[in-house]
Image (cartoon, rainbow, N blue to C red):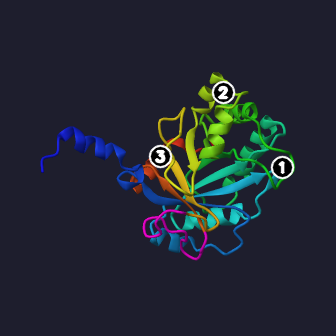
């Protein structure tokens, strides 16, 4: 049977990005993960980067952040930090987040080369302070950029991203401002497709707390000694992830 070149090309485009251009290489952690994490085993199993909660409402430092930063660095893993946003003063939140990351980065003798920064822009149902609004998210990321010269990543579920960016109060200017960030999107059921105004996701969280509807062989839920991990696809190879960290990571001493 003859198949046209055009049909082959279109079939290729229809493939999910994870089928040909992504690596299952990033894990995110927070103070809710109570185990002693085996970062060396993570490294052996193909993980290249860890993104850890650094701060959350109201003005609390994640108590596991500093020790895990050192342990991950000793294991040769890339390191990132995220802040869980709320509806309080976004500039004050950004300052607290950066001060937390900078102080913990300078302390240990073993530390990562740089820190990838992220705003966790999800619905706040378990901390005080309410849920961060879209305008507050814009102010937060602009403050991060002003202080560091880097735009942070924006983490959000696919459903909430659509709800917030294209809701009745959202503006084109706000969408444009947030599109300066790289996109980290969550969907535990299928690969995210609705990513506008971004053309594509940079990282895709496909499982968390053991929830994942995707084939276990290709999308495992656990890693190292964590049975129900929060695992992520990075759009690109492990080498591309390292290059991305190098370009977008913050060096607090600078």
Give the dominant element type of the magenta stretch: helix, strand or loop.
loop
Judge whether residue 217 is colored magenta. Answer: yes
Secondary structure type for disc 3: helix
Q: Specify the label residue 174 is tagged with.
A: 2
Characterize the local packing of mark 1: few (<14), some (14-19) or many (20 or more) Cα atoms within 10 angstroms.
few
Q: CA distance from mark 1 to mark 2?
A: 25 Å
Q: Nearer the viewer, residue 70 or 87?
A: 87
Question: Is 102 in front, or is 222?
Answer: 222
> At which x and y percent is residue 178?
62, 32
Q: Is residue 201 left or right of residue 99?
A: left
- Which portion, as a residue range, is magenta? 213-228
Which disc, if any, is residue 59? 1
Q: Position of residue 170 (x, y in %)?
A: 69, 28
Q: Nearer the viewer, mark 3 or mark 2?
A: 2
- Asked if one can make out residue 109 in the rendered structure from this viewpoint, the answer is no
On screen, residue 81 above or below 5: below
């Amino acid at each position: 049977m003859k198949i046209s070149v055009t049909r082959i090309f279109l079939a290729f485009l229809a493939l999910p990005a994870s089928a040909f251009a992504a690596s299952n290489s990033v894990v995110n952690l927070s103070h809710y993960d109570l185990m002693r994490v085996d970062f060396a085993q993570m490294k052996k199993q193909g993980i290249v980067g860890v993104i850890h909660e650094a701060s959350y409402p109201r003005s609390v430092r994640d108590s596991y952040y500093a020790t895990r930063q050192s342990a991950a660095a000793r294991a040769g893993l890339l390191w990132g930090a995220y802040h869980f946003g709320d509806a309080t003063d976004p500039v004050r939140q950004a300052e607290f987040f950066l001060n937390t990351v900078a102080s913990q980065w300078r302390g240990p003798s073993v530390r990562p080369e740089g820190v990838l920064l992220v705003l966790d822009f999800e619905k706040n149902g378990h901390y005080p302070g309410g849920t961060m609004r879209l305008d507050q998210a814009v102010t937060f990321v602009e403050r991060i950029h002003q202080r560091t010269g880097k735009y942070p990543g924006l983490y959000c579920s696919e459903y909430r991203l659509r709800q917030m960016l294209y809701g009745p109060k959202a503006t084109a200017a706000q969408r444009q401002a947030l599109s300066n960030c790289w996109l980290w999107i969550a969907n535990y059921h299928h690969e995210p497709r609705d990513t506008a105004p971004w053309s594509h996701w940079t990282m895709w969280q496909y499982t968390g707390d053991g929830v994942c509807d995707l084939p276990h062989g290709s999308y495992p839920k656990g890693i190292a000694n964590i049975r129900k991990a929060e695992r992520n696809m990075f759009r690109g190879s492990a080498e591309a992830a390292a290059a991305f960290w190098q370009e977008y990571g913050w060096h607090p001493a600078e």
